[in-house]
Amino acid sequence: MQDLSLTLLQTSLQWENPEANLAHFDRLISRIQGPTDLILLPEMFNTGFSMRADSLAETMEGPTVNWMKTKAAQNQTVVFGSLIIREEKAFYNRLVAALPDGSLQYYNKRHLFRMAGEQLTYTGGNELLTLEIKGWKIRPFVCYDLRFPVWSRNSFDPLAGWQYDLAVYVANWPSARAHAWKSLPVARAIENQAWIATLNRIGSDGKGHTYSGDSQVINSYGETVVHLDEAEYVQTVVLDRNSLEKHREVFPVGRDADRFEIFP
């Protein structure tokens, strides 16, 4: 298996201003040096974490998703980012995966942040997504999902192998809860024997919440390979496949995990 290159775009967001945010991400993507397999954008990267879905929602044929498709094709990479999507009468906090061939896959955020009333505006998802890039099985999640280890659960099947090799969490996680944001990914990496990548925003939003970044890339041992402070970064990191496979071979704890099913 090949190594995987991952680029984190940690930056501030202009409140409820899709045009300005897309223009800013155009500039950040132009700063990426060399090829990368996956570009990560924050949660609701074109608007900030807004509950004004009625005025900000787009469709899967809208300008932001088309922008993601263009960036994926231009850079021959996969682009992950969440935004507000409308389908019929429902709104979703949807992580869209734009592939370089023009195709799309998506994951609807399952755990809606009730302390901000997210569940009053958005419909939660009930299906996981696993995307394969260069032989890596990648599973995306959104923000509050990080607090729920059962939903993030990885498992090993003798025939199918591991469910995922890398879990990605994109977020708007306020600095008031930075300790949890920095600590929980370590637990997710250790318990699931997988790489974990987290991407947060910085700056402040229209509700007065501040964000300290603290995006991380953590290996399957729970060791932090990359930690970004509260500045803006265009950071590419290479994930070592060999170390992951060796860890799973010499210490196959996942083969002894309890079996259970998750119901919607």
Image (cartoon, rainbow, N blue to C red):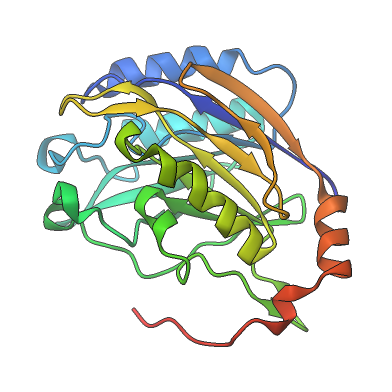
The N terminus, quarter of image: bottom right
Residue at left offset 40%, top offset 29%: 201
Residue at left offset 21%, top offset 40%: 57
Q: Quadrant of residue 24?
A: top left
Residue 100 in sight here: no
Residue at left offset 63%, top offset 56%: 189
Query: Residue 109 vs residue 10: left or right?
Result: left
The residue closer to the viewer here, 49 or 227, is 227
Q: Quadrant of residue 122?
A: bottom left
Query: Residue 181 vs residue 53: left or right?
Result: right
The residue closer to the viewer here, 48 or 210, is 210
Residue at left offset 11%, top offset 35%: 55
Where is residue 63? Give x, y as percent: 33, 31
Please, is residue 85 above or below residue 26 in the view?
below
The residue closer to the viewer here, 255 or 13, is 255
Where is residue 62? Give x, y as percent: 31, 37
Residue 86 in sight here: yes
Where is residue 247? Give x, y as percent: 83, 61
Where is residue 104? Give x, y as percent: 49, 49
Query: Residue 44 vs residue 8: left or right?
Result: left
Please, is residue 113 above or below residue 68 in the view?
below
